[in-house]
Image (cartoon, grey):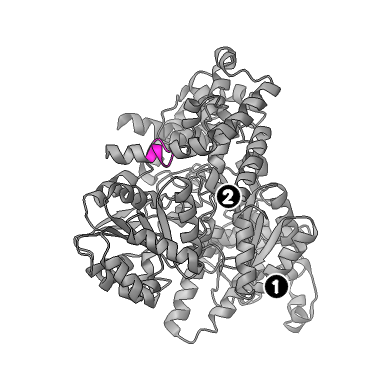
C-alpha cells in the first residue's frame, strides 16, 4: 500500500485515505473481485483510479452516464493521468485518436458506455489489449430489483467472462441485500468481498421547515447563499419553468432543467452550471445523475420528494468536497396529497402500496422531532446511534422556545373528533377559526359548539400546531386521503388532561448558526475563485477540476508562501503544483503583502486560539479545544457573541467525533442539584439517550431540556472513560 499512498498524495493531493478506501484498494490490488456500496461523495473514484495507475494493463470503466465520464476524464487529465473516453459524444477525429491511444497502450483508463461494448471494433480492440481491471459504475443497473434497471448492463457478465484474469469491481450508491446478490451473480464475480460505507454525510446540514410562502422562503434561503452553487428541486416541469423565470427576473443566476426541454438546451444549461457560468439549477429529479460538481453548497427541495431514496440521492449532490452544505426541505401536507394522486394512478396494486409505504417514510422523516439522521440513516439499514449530530435543525433547536400547548391540542383534537375524523388539517383549522365556507355549511359544522373557538391563533399558527400534534402521534394521518384520526395517545390529552409541550411560535430557521463557521479569509477566497474561473475557461474545463472549493478555502486560511507549504493544501499534488502553483502562490503572496499579513510573526505572536483558526480547523473544534484548555462556557459565549447553549452544542459535536471533554465546566451550567444527576444517569442506563422527551416527562418537567442535554453529554463521557 506504500505505492498507493504515494499516488494518493503525489497525484490526487490528499494526505490520507477516507474510511474504507484503503481496504478497498488493497482488496483490488490483491486481484479479488469487489462490490462497493458507497454513498454519493464518499470517494469511490479513487478506489479504482489508484489501482489503475499501479496495474500494468488497462482499467476499463463502464458507466451509463456520459456527463460523468467526460467529467472524470477531464479531471484525470488535469492530474496527468493517461485517460481516454470512447462514446457517441466525441467527434470522429477525437474518437479515432482515443481508439489509437488504447491500441498503442498509451492509456491507463478507458471510460466507455455499456452499449459500446457490443460493437465489433470495440470488442476486437479490447480482446487484443491486456486488461487488468473491469470497473462497473452504477452497478445496480444490472439488477431487475434495482431502481434503475438497464438492459445494456445484462451483457456485462458475458463481457467479464472474456477477461477471467481481470479483477472485477462493482460500485453503487445504494443497494438492498437482494440487489447486492444480483450484482455479484450477474457480473460473474468469484468470492467477491463486499464493502458497505456509512450513509452518514457529516458535512450536510439537514433542515425541514413548513412550507408557507414558498417563493419568499426560497428567496430568503438563496440570499443566505449568495455567490454559491446550488440545486432547487421541484415536483413538476411547469413549476421548474415558472420558478426559474421568477428567480431570474429578480436577478438570481438560474436556468431550468427537465425532460421537457430539448437535448441541446438541457445539455447547455447543465454545462453552464458545471462551469460556474450560472449559480443555480432549478430542476426536476431528472437532474444530477452523473454530475461530479464538487462545490454545490446547497440543495433546496421546493416540494416533497416521493421517497427517501430520491431525497438522499439528491441532497448527496451537495458538499462533495467535504465542506459544509445546507439541505432544506419545504414541507407541506398538500404535497402529500399531490403525490398520492399520482400514486393512485398506478394500476398495479403491489406497486401502488409500495409507493405509499415509501411516501410514508419520507413524511415521517419530515415530521420527526429527533435527530434527522436517525430515521434517514436507519432507513438504509445502518444502525445510527449518535444522540446529537449538531448538523440538523432538530439537534440545534432552541429548546427554550417550547411551552404548554395543551389547550390548543384539546381544541384541535376535539374538532377532529366532532367532525367525524374524515377531514384534513386545513378543514379542521377553518372550523376552529369560524370560517363558514360552503363546504363547512354543507356539512352543518357551523352549528358545532366548537365552531370559531380557535380565533386567538391565526391559520399559520394552527398549521404549526397541527404539524406538532401529528409528530407527537396524537393524530394519525390517512396515507390515501390525508384525513386525520385520533390516536390512543389523544384520549390522555382530551380526558385525562395530560400536558402537551411544543412550540407556540414556529421554530426559526437557524441561519445565523450556519453562517458562523466561516473562519477563512473571504476576500482572498474570492480572488482565488476568480483566477480559478479564468483558468477553467481557458482550458474549457469545470472550475472544480482546477481546484475544489476545499482547496481554495485552505489556501485562504493557511496563506501558503512557497511550494512546500502549497503542497500541504488538500487536493494539491505534484502535477497541480507544476501547473498552477506559481499562479496561485503569486496571488496569495501579493494579497498578504497588500494586507500586511506577515505569516511567520503572526504565528509567533497570536494567541493559541487564533493559531488554531490559521490551521483551518472547524469552528466547533476551535471552540471545544479552548473549552478543554480552561475557558468557561460563558466566557466563550461572550467571545463568540452566541448563547451558552450554542457553545455547548459545539462541545457536544466535538465529543461526538470521539474526543474527550472536561466535564467540570459543564457541571457549572447545571441548574439542578447533584441528587438529580444520578437519577437521570440511572434512567439513561435503562432507556438510552436517543430521545430526551420521555425522560423530561418522567421527571415531571422538573429537569429542564437544557439540563438534560448537558447531563447526557456528561453521562456519555463517563461511559467512554469506563470503556
Q: Is residue 113 visible?
A: yes
* Magenta stretch prevailing secondary structure: loop
Query: Residue 334 location in percent, x, y?
Result: 65, 70
* Among the two numbered marks 2 and 1 on one chain, the one whose residue lies closer to the N terminus: 1
Q: Which mark is residue 427?
A: 1
Residue at x 70%, y 47% (from the top left corner): 226
Mark 2 to mark 1 CA distance (whole Å): 59 Å
Q: Is residue 450 visible?
A: no
Q: In the image, is residue 387 part of the stretch drawn in magenta? A: no
Residue at x 53%, y 27% (from the top left corner): 622
Question: What residue range appears in magenta?
Answer: 8-15
Other residues around mark 1 within 10 Å, as few (<14) / some (14–19) / many (≥20)? some
Q: Give the label, 2 or 1, closer to the camera.
A: 2
Q: As drawn, is 429 to the left or to the right of 355?
A: right
Task: Check the image and report above or below for 348 versus 85.
Answer: below
Query: Residue 46 location in percent, x, y?
Result: 38, 49
Q: Which mark is residue 539?
A: 2
Residue at x 66%, y 26% (from the top left corner): 590
Residue 677 falls in which quadrant of the image? top left
Specify the quadrant that holds the N terminus: top left
Q: Which mark is residue 123?
A: none
Q: Secondary structure at mark 1?
A: helix
The number of numbered discs placed on residues in the rendered structure image is 2
Task: Check the image and report above or below for 275 versus 677.
Answer: below
The answer to whether the residue labelled 2 contacts the one labelled 1, judged by CB atoms less than 8 Å apart, is no
Q: Nearer the viewer, residue 467 or 531?
A: 531
Amino acid at each position: 500500500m506504500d505505492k498507493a499512498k504515494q499516488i494518493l498524495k503525489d497525484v490526487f493531493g490528499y494526505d490520507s485515505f477516507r474510511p474504507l478506501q484503503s481496504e478497498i484498494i488493497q482488496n483490488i490490488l490483491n486481484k479479488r473481485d469487489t462490490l462497493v456500496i458507497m454513498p454519493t461523495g464518499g470517494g469511490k473514484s479513487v478506489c479504482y483510479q489508484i489501482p489503475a495507475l499501479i496495474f500494468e494493463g488497462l482499467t476499463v470503466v463502464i458507466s451509463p452516464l456520459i456527463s460523468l465520464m467526460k467529467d472524470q476524464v477531464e479531471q484525470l487529465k488535469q492530474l496527468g493521468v493517461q485517460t481516454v473516453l470512447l462514446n457517441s459524444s466525441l467527434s470522429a477525429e477525437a474518437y479515432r485518436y482515443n481508439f489509437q491511444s488504447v491500441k498503442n497502450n498509451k492509456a491507463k483508463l478507458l471510460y466507455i458506455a455499456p452499449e459500446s461494448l457490443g460493437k465489433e471494433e470495440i470488442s476486437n480492440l479490447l480482446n487484443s489489449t491486456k486488461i487488468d481491471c473491469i470497473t462497473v459504475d452504477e452497478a445496480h443497473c444490472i439488477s431487475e430489483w434495482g431502481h434503475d434497471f438497464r438492459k445494456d448492463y445484462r451483457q456485462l457478465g458475458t463481457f467479464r467472462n472474456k477477461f477471467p484474469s481481470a479483477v472485477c469491481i462493482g460500485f453503487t450508491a445504494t443497494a438492498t441485500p437482494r440487489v447486492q446478490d444480483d450484482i455479484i451473480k450477474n457480473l460473474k464475480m468469484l468470492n467477491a468481498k463486499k464493502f458497505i460505507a456509512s450513509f452518514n454525510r457529516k458535512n450536510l446540514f439537514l433542515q425541514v421547515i413548513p412550507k408557507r410562502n414558498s417563493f419568499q422562503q426560497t428567496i430568503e434561503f438563496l440570499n443566505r447563499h449568495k455567490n454559491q452553487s446550488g440545486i432547487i428541486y421541484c415536483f413538476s416541469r411547469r413549476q421548474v419553468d415558472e420558478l426559474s423565470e421568477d428567480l431570474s427576473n429578480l436577478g438570481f443566476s438560474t436556468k431550468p432543467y427537465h425532460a421537457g426541454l430539448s437535448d441541446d438546451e438541457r445539455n447547455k444549461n447543465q454545462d453552464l452550471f458545471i462551469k460556474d457560468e450560472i449559480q443555480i439549477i432549478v430542476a426536476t429529479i431528472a437532474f444530477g445523475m452523473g454530475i461530479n460538481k464538487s462545490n454545490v453548497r446547497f440543495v433546496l427541495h421546493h416540494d416533497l420528494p416521493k421517497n427517501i431514496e430520491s431525497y438522499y440521492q439528491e441532497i448527496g449532490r451537495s458538499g462533495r468536497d467535504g465542506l459544509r452544505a445546507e439541505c432544506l426541505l419545504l414541507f407541506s401536507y398538500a404535497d402529500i396529497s399531490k403525490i398520492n394522486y399520482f400514486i393512485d394512478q398506478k394500476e398495479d396494486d403491489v406497486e401502488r402500496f409500495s409507493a405509499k409505504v415509501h411516501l410514508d417514510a419520507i413524511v415521517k422523516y419530515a415530521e420527526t422531532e429527533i435527530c434527522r439522521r436517525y430515521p434517514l440513516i436507519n432507513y438504509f439499514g445502518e444502525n445510527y446511534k449518535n444522540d446529537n449530530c449538531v448538523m440538523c435543525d432538530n439537534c440545534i433547536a432552541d429548546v427554550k422556545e417550547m411551552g404548554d400547548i395543551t389547550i390548543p391540542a384539546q381544541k384541535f383534537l376535539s374538532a377532529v373528533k366532532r367532525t367525524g375524523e374524515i377531514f384534513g388539517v386545513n378543514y379542521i383549522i377553518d372550523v376552529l377559526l369560524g370560517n363558514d365556507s360552503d363546504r363547512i355549511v354543507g356539512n352543518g359544522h357551523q352549528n358545532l359548539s366548537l365552531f370559531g373557538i380557535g380565533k386567538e391563533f391565526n391559520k399559520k399558527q394552527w398549521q404549526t400546531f397541527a404539524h406538532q400534534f401529528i409528530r407527537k402521534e396524537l393524530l394519525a394521518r390517512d396515507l390515501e386521503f390525508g384525513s386525520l384520526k385520533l390516536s390512543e395517545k389523544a384520549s390522555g390529552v382530551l380526558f385525562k388532561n395530560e400536558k402537551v409541550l411544543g412550540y407556540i411560535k414556529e421554530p426559526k430557521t437557524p441561519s445565523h448558526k450556519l453562517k458562523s463557521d466561516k473562519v477563512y479569509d473571504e476576500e482572498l477566497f474570492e480572488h482565488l475563485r476568480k483566477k480559478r474561473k479564468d483558468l477553467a475557461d481557458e482550458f474549457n474545463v469545470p472550475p472544480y477540476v482546477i481546484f475544489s472549493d476545499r482547496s481554495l478555502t485552505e489556501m485562504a486560511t493557511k496563506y501558503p508562501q512557497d511550494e512546500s507549504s502549497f503542497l500541504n493544501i488538500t487536493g494539491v499534488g505534484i502535477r497541480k503544483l507544476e501547473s498552477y502553483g506559481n499562479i496561485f502562490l503569486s496571488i496569495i503572496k501579493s494579497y498578504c503583502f497588500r494586507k500586511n499579513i506577515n505569516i511567520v510573526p503572526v504565528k509567533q505572536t497570536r494567541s493559541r486560539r487564533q493559531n488554531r483558526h490559521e490551521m483551518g480547523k472547524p469552528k466547533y473544534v476551535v471552540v471545544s479545544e479552548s473549552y478543554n484548555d480552561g475557558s468557561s462556557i460563558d466566557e466563550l459565549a461572550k467571545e463568540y457573541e452566541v448563547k451558552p447553549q450554542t457553545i455547548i452544542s459545539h462541545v457536544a459535536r466535538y465529543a461526538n467525533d470521539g474526543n474527550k471533554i472536561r466535564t467540570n465546566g459543564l457541571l457549572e451550567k447545571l441548574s439542578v442539584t447533584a441528587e438529580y444527576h444520578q437519577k437521570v444517569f440511572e434512567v439513561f442506563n435503562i432507556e438510552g439517550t436517543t430521545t430526551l422527551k420521555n425522560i423530561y416527562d418522567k421527571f415531571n418537567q422538573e429537569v429542564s431540556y437544557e439540563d438534560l442535554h448537558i447531563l447526557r453529554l456528561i453521562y456519555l463521557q463517563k461511559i467512554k472513560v469506563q470503556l
